[in-house]
């Protein structure tokens, strides 16, 4: 799955208001970014952006519970908006 597809899956999980699926999509995207290296320079750059956004969203997302709630930063609308704007941009780049 490329960066744009991961971005689309994350956005879909968020829009469904499914916190378990959202957390799973964030984890899947981050793992994919860490292990995948393509010959395509643009895709590598998009994966770096995706990994950065995912790491930030994992810190600022509304906490689920337990350990993830303990390490979460306060959820700010501005941080979430910035992350989702970047995900939307990644998703749209694939459609173009």
Image (tube, helix red, strand yellow):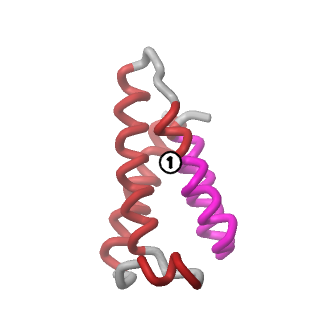
Q: Residue at x 53, y 49 (%)?
A: 7
Is residue 21 a member of the stretch shown in magenta? Answer: yes
Structural crowding at the residue carrying mark 1, measured as other residues with C-alpha within 10 Å and reported as few (<14), some (14–19) or many (≥20): many
Q: Is residue 66 above or below residue 40?
A: below
Residue lying at the far front of the rendered structure: 67
Q: Where residue 15 sits in the image (x, y, percent)?
A: 62, 69
Q: Is residue 8 left or right of residue 54?
A: right
Name the quarter where the N terminus is drawn.
Answer: top right
Is residue 74 a member of the stretch shown in magenta? Answer: no
Q: Nearer the viewer, residue 31 or 84?
A: 31
Q: Which residue is mark 1?
A: 30
The quadrant holding residue 39 is top left
Q: Is residue 74 left or right of residue 94?
A: left
Type of secondary structure dominating the magenta stretch: helix
Q: Residue at x 46, y 75 (%)?
A: 61
Q: Where residue 46 sits in the image (x, y, percent)?
A: 40, 37
């Amino acid at each position: 799955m490329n960066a744009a597809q991961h971005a689309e899956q994350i956005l879909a999980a968020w829009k469904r208001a499914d916190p378990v699926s959202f957390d799973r999509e964030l984890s899947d995207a981050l793992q994919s970014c860490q292990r995948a290296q393509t010959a395509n320079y643009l895709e590598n750059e998009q994966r770096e952006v995706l990994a950065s956004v995912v790491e930030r969203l994992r810190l600022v997302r509304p906490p689920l519970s337990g350990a993830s709630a303990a390490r979460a930063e306060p959820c700010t609308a501005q941080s979430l908006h910035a992350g989702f704007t970047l995900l939307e941009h990644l998703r749209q780049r694939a459609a173009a």
